[in-house]
Each structure stands twice: as structure tokens, then as C-alpha cells.
Amino acid sequence: MAIKRIGVLTSGGDAPGMNPCVRSVVRTALYHGLECYGIRRGWNGLITGDVVRLDEKNIGHIINRGGTILYTARSKEFMTEEGQLRATATCKFLGLDGIVAIGGDGTFRGAQALSRHGVNVVCIPGTIDNDIGCTNYCIGFDTAANTAIECIDKLRDTMQSHERCSVVEVMGRNAGYLAMYVGLAVGATAVLIPEEPIDFNRDVIEKIRQARFNGFTHYMIVVAEGAGSASDIAAQIKEAIGLDPRVTVLGHIQRGGTPTGRDRVNATKMGYLAVELLVAGKTNRIVCTNAGSFTDVDIEEGLNMHKGIQRMEEDVLMAMTGV
Ligand code: F6P
């Protein structure tokens, strides 16, 4: 059956690039002669029927805007069978033939449930954590990383002037992709990520000593939120070697800001592919990008994939820290 009308929503934590992705979904839908509706406030909007018609005009000039014009939420109700049935009923009532859901793994689990109730759904990975196993890249990662890098570069100026130690906490939930990337980009003294077991003396204290022997008198420690709290690590450093580190938790600032070119282009390609998949009659898929090409994978399969930290990345991290 040819599809006529689709919906698009953003769910979970927002990520810079969600707006360009919504824009791309709408433009691709219109290109195929489909009607497109924005579902507001994530899955909650599908439960309550909180929808708005989207066309060229109301998605104009959002390609450069952070956040999401559709709002977002983490819906507890949608995690229940009753919530999913209500959302399915909304799709039937409004005649939505397919849904594009932009978000992280929680969003994908919701999409999978909806798909089991017979609704066509395609997911797009949008999370600064970059922690979706089936895709090398998630929308928002590049912007978040660049925001964190800019902040840490600023911190370094004052840390250097005062010959201090800085402990900076980077977001990422249970994953260290963001912290590792940022740590490499700022030339951190040490980087702590949850994927690697931490030996505090070897991974922090010895790295600081190494830097000191190399002539440095300020130290930048980057810690992924999933690897520990910056204040605890600062306290441990103080106790171990008497430095008095300053603590910075970058927090939600990493989720805001104008999406970078990389995020805009990836978001645009992913949005396009998601609609193409729905038009081709596919459902229950996650759009992904690996080794430069854009593909799709079954939701269940995608959720079970694990990308981990590459051996080479670990080696680079070992070689680049402590200097
Ligand atoms: O998943 C994105 C993320 O920003 C994580 O990095 C962080 O742990 C979490 O969301 C914060 O969630 P909230 O916006 O609910 O504070």
C-alpha cells in the first residue's frame, strides 16, 4: 500500500542536529508528495495526539538551530502497553502511515514496541553520547564535542596561568565516546572512560607526574560522567599528591548550540534515508552510517550490536596522555 501521510518526532535527550533532521524528513516527504506531521514532545505527543502539520514554511531556517522545534521528552507512559496502544490508536485515527523517530536507544525501544503493534517506524540515531552500537555516528556528537573542546581550551588558559590542575566532567551517560574524543582533541593529561578499568595511580597520578617531568605545571584531567564524578576525582588527587584541582562539570551546555556542518549534513542524509525506507515499505529499521556509507538495520539487531572502544583508540590515548 502506498503511503500518504507520515509523522516525525524527537525523543529522549535533545541533540544539536535534530532540527536539520526534522527539516530533511519534511522536505523528503514533500518531495514524494506525502503529507508530514510533527509529533510534539516525543512519544507523549503520539499518545495525546499533539501534532502539527509541517511544510516548507514552518521548517524554514531551522537547519542552523540547536534543540528541537518539536520539543522532546522521555515518556514513561509510552513504556507501558497501555501507552503504546493509545499511540497506535492515534496513528490509526490520524491516518499516519509511518513514523520517523529521532533519538537514542530508549527511543528505539519505544519504536520497536510500536512496530509490534503494526505501525511502520524508522529510527534515526540522535544523541550526543554516540552510544548506538550499529552506527559509527549519531547526530549531535560533533557539535557537542566541539562545544566541550572550546570550553576546555578556555579553561586551559586560566589553568596554565595559575599552574593548576583541572578536572572536567564530560557527558555521555554510560559511554566514554564523547570524553575520549574530547580528551584527545584538547591534549588532556589523563582521560577516564567507563569502558576501561581505572587504576587511579597509573591512569591519573602517574600521568600527572609524567607531565610534570616533561616540564608542564598545569594538568587537564577529562572524565566521562560514566567513569566517576569530577569532584571525587579532584578530592582523590588532592589526597594523593596535594594538588588543589578546580572542578568543572560541563553539563547541558554540551547539548546546545548551532549544529556543526558535519551534524547538519549527516542529519540531512539520515532524514532523507528514513523517508525513503518508509516509502519503500520498510519498517522497524534504524538508519545508520558506517565507513562513510548510509544503511539501515533491524531495530532488534541494531540494539544488540556493540561497537566498544577500538584497540587503536586505546593505544592512541595511552600515547597522547601524560605529556
Ligand atoms: O543522553 C544524553 C544525555 O545528555 C547524557 O549524556 C546525560 O547523561 C543525560 O542525557 C542527561 O539527561 P537529562 O537531560 O535528563 O539531565
Image: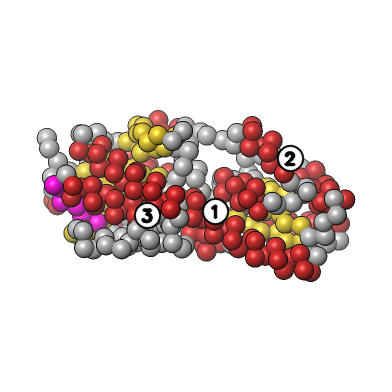
What type is the residue that disc 3 sits on?
Met
Visible residue check, residue 9: no
Q: Nearer the N terminus, badge 2 or badge 1?
A: 1
Q: Are marks 2 and 1 in contact (CB under 8 Å)?
A: no
Which residue is found at the position 69% from the left and 41% from the top? 317
Mark 1, residues whose alpha carbon is within 10 Å: few (<14), some, or many (≥20)? many
Q: CA distance from mark 2 to mark 3?
A: 35 Å
The quadrant of the image that shows the N terminus is top left
Task: Identify the disc placed on residue 18.
Answer: 3
Residue linked to disc 1: 145
Q: In the image, which disc is placed on residue 137?
A: none
Label 3 secondary element: helix
Asked whether residue 268 is drawn in magenta, I would say no
The residue under the point 47% across, 62% down is: 256
User: Could you classify mark 2 by the number of other residues whose Cα lies within 10 Å: few (under 14), some (14-19), or many (20 or more)?
Assistant: few
Q: Position of residue 115 (x, y in %)?
A: 27, 38
Q: Is residue 30 left or right of residue 287?
A: left
Tell me which segment is drawn in magenta: 33-38
In the picture of the structure, the residue carrying the numbered disc 2 is 319
For residue 101, above or below residue 287: below
Judged from this view, the residue extending furthest toward the front is: 261
Provide residue 8's location: percent of width, then percent of height. Answer: 27, 51
Residue type at the position of mark 1? Ala
Q: Position of residue 33 (x, y in %)?
A: 13, 47
Q: Main secondary structure of the magenta part?
A: strand
Q: CA distance from mark 3 to mark 1?
A: 16 Å
Q: Secondary structure at mark 1?
A: helix
Real-space CA distance between mark 2 and mark 1, rounded to the nearest whole angstrom:
21 Å
